[in-house]
Image (tube, grey):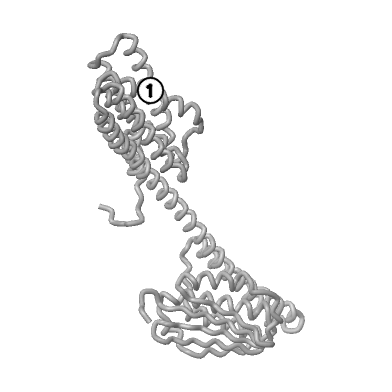
Amino acid sequence: MNDDPTDFDPRRLARLRRYTWWSIVPLMPVYALFPAADLVSGPYTAPEIVVLALVALLVAVDGTLLSAPLMRGFGHGPRHPAARGAVFAAGLAAMGYAIQAHPAGLVWVVPIGGLIGVHVALAETRLRWPIEIASLVVTAAAVWVAAALGGPHPMIGMFAAFYAVVIVAMVSALVVGVVWFWDMVLELDRARSVSGELAIARERLRFAADLHDVQGHHLQAIALKAELAERLVGNDDEAARAQAAEVAELARTALRDTRAVVQGYRHSNLTGELANAREILEAAGVRTEVRGDATLVPPPLQPLFGALVREGTTNVLRHSRARHCALEITVDGPRTSVVLRNDGANPPGGAGGSGIDGLRQRFATLSGHVEARHDGEHFELTGTAEEPGVAA
């Protein structure tokens, strides 16, 4: 037995669809069996049987044709009010004639109730109750008049009208109830599809953020070392060759990391990112200081803060003339914060780049937040989050 609550078997929906189809579409021919039984046993002449049978067939066929679109949910039927009204009027006339002929003719209210239920299910939401109430009133009035014409006592008409209202209400409620249930199933299935699409979109955003972090960080370091090697050529060829070798190694590392991101296997951690950031920054002439113990950061938050340090380091190299950078790690119970400060920051040119926006989105998934603040030539990037599942 599969206990995964996210598992979905499309065969179950297909079985439910078949069950619902048999509960909606063939109902009108079944309801037409009641007038057929009345025609067989009632006191009708041959011409009367032919005319009444044609009307019963018309009601059954029209109701069946209208029932098929209900498999798409509420309000998806054809809009031909004149034709629908003519069929309903013919059904009411046949019902009234049968009731006037003998009391057993009341069975004709069953297909009338089914037809009303189909009309209500096909209508817009704001029109369903008005159509239901108006149909009940018209049907009750027709039954009352027909029963009064066929019997000597007026109480017969009142009883017949009450009986007709109860039967019509029950039959129409049965039709509407089945369609309502199926409409809810369709809505849930659409919600499931939208949820799947959102999950794919979130994964694409996560992948784009990871790719931006990896490529931006490595390419910035490659560019820096390539420029350094270019300046050393002719002055210190040995150092230039060393820098070129490091460029090649960085390129290979970037390729490996990019492949790992594509395959979904790259799991950065704060400790590794701190060591990498210090090496890169100091190679660029930025004095780097780390305060706090990265190993105290909970494992679930290590990749998150690793991404923060990686993005902050890239910004220092790309958007500043920094000479000093400080990284501060604070762990207070389940709450962890990492602050990256640097001097020599360029003047702010907007609300922040796409990298910081991506960080904000990633931190938001853990109810954390990221703040980027300029203070003159100083820039501060702060990330705060709590370990999932741990109460403060």
Question: Left or right of 29: which side holds 346?
Answer: right
Question: Who is closer to the viewer here, 125 or 147?
Answer: 147
Query: In this view of the protein, can residue 82 be seen by the observer?
Result: yes
Instruction: Where is residue 42? Give x, y as percent.
Output: 24, 16
Figure disc tally: 1
Q: Residue at x 75, y 80 (%)?
A: 231
Q: Is residue 345 above or below residue 161?
A: below
Amino acid marked by disc 1: Ala
**Extreme residue in the front direction:** 153
Instruction: Where is residue 168? Give x, y as percent.
Output: 32, 34
Question: Who is closer to the viewer here, 187 or 349?
Answer: 187
Question: Left or right of 391: which side holds 284?
Answer: right
When asked about the image quadrant of residue 293, the answer is bottom left
Q: Secondary structure at mark 1?
A: helix
Name the residue beneath numbered marker 1.
93
Q: Residue at x 53, y 69 (%)?
A: 361
Query: In this view of the protein, can residue 249 be seen by the observer?
Result: no
Question: Left or right of 247: which side holds 62?
Answer: left
Instruction: Where is residue 136? Give x, y as percent.
Output: 36, 36
Q: Quadrant of the C terminus?
A: bottom left
Instruction: Where is residue 216? Give x, y as percent.
Output: 62, 71
Q: Is residue 178 above or below residue 338?
A: above
When asked about the image quadrant of residue 137, the answer is top left
Q: Residue at x 63, y 76 (%)?
A: 221
Question: Who is closer to the viewer here, 168 or 275?
Answer: 168
Q: Residue at x 40, y 77 (%)?
A: 387
Q: Residues within 10 Å of mark 1 (few under 14, many from 20)?
A: some
**Extreme residue in the right direction:** 234
